[in-house]
């Protein structure tokens, strides 16, 4: 029997839990973002301590990425910035897949504040957003448009910057929502108390605000889920996305965590990959 659990990564993403004969389980998290209430899910409660193999997303499962703010907190920070710059041209930069809920939140904020539609430079992104939510008030901005909305959304800075320049104006502020910028810039202070928007001023005088937006789980969140499920084996999926990946690659060998009293799985000071036994399993 196959069960699906919301992975909180992007629209439609799901964890997969397989209920096997004999009351045992296999679990694959896929890309996931830990969230309040996840551990209360009845399927996870039922499968706890009965999982033979657990495949886990380890994109940011490193102690240097110990904590991330929640998605809701990221949205509140974005709303606060949009309120501050409510009369300015804004270039909003976010990724494509997974940013739909940010665009929905921004659209609701605009509606409640009497704002106009959002501009979208990319035709593909525009179509994807309309499929995800047909009620979004969006305008596809082409190369010949002169009437450009005050807020333009793009995956890359050049997309929304170019669109705003078409109207004869320059974006007075850029707002960027991402995780990678924080992992490259703030590894020494990856604590939730430090995850406030950070302002940079470029050589052209434009301001860029960086807001933490995490679609993957932090080290502590991954650790908490693994500890809760107590699987017999953990198999990492992907590689840790740190800026200095040459420093080490904990997933170069398929190490496996063993759920036994000797496994170092309770010390929160350990790196996540220290949960994985260096001894390769016998074939």
Image: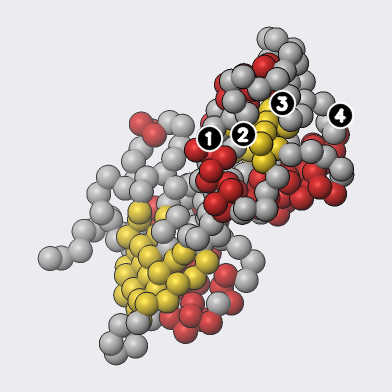
- Between 34 and 122, the one lying in front of the other is 122
Quarter of the image where the C terminus is located: bottom left
Q: Is residue 58 left or right of residue 23?
A: right
Q: Which residue is disc 1 drawn over?
A: 123
Q: Position of residue 267 (x, y in %)?
A: 50, 61
Figure quadrant of residue 152: top right
**Disc on the earlier residue, 3 or 4:** 4
Q: Which residue is disc 2 drawn over?
A: 140
Q: Residues within 10 Å of mark 3 (few under 14, many from 20)?
A: many
Q: Which mark is residue 221?
A: none
- Gap in Å between the C-alphas at discs 2 and 4? 21 Å
**Disc on the earlier residue, 3 or 2:** 2
- Gap in Å between the C-alphas at discs 3 and 4? 14 Å
Is the C-beta separation of discs 4 and 1 under 8 Å? no
Residue farthest to the left, as pictured: 283
**Disc on the earlier residue, 2 or 1:** 1
Mark 3 element type: loop
Q: Position of residue 278 (x, y in %)?
A: 28, 55
Q: Position of residue 280 (x, y in %)?
A: 21, 59
Is the C-beta separation of discs 2 and 1 under 8 Å? yes
Q: Which residue is disc 3 drawn over?
A: 148
Residue 190 position (above or below residue 6): above
Residue farthest to the bottom, as pictured: 22
**Disc on the earlier residue, 4 or 1:** 4
**Disc on the earlier residue, 2 or 4:** 4
């Amino acid at each position: 029997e196959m069960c699906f659990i919301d992975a909180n990564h992007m629209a439609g993403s799901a964890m997969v839990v397989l209920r096997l004969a004999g009351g045992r389980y296999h679990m694959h998290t896929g890309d996931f973002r830990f969230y309040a209430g996840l551990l209360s899910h009845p399927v996870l409660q039922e499968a706890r301590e009965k999982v033979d193999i657990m495949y886990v997303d380890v994109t940011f499962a490193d102690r240097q990425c110990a904590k991330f703010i929640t998605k809701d907190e990221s949205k509140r920070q974005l709303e606060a910035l949009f309120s501050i710059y409510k009369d300015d041209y804004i270039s909003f930069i976010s990724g494509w897949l997974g940013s739909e809920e940010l665009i929905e939140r921004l659209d609701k904020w605009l509606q409640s504040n009497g704002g106009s539609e959002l501009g979208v430079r990319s035709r593909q992104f525009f179509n994807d957003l309309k499929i995800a939510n047909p009620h979004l008030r969006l305008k596809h901005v082409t190369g010949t448009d002169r009437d450009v909305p005050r807020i333009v959304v793009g995956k890359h800075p050049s997309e929304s910057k170019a669109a705003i320049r078409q109207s004869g104006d320059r974006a007075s502020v850029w707002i960027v929502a991402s995780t990678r910028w924080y992992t490259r810039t703030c590894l020494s202070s990856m604590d939730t108390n430090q995850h406030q928007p950070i302002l940079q001023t470029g050589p052209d005088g434009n301001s860029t605000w960086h807001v933490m937006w995490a679609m993957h789980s932090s080290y502590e969140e991954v650790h908490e889920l693994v500890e809760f499920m107590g699987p017999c084996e953990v198999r990492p999926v992907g590689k840790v996305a740190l800026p200095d990946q040459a420093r080490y690659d904990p997933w170069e060998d398929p190490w496996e965590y063993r759920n036994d009293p000797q496994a170092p799985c309770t010390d929160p000071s350990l790196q996540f990959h220290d949960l994985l036994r260096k001894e390769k399993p016998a074939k």
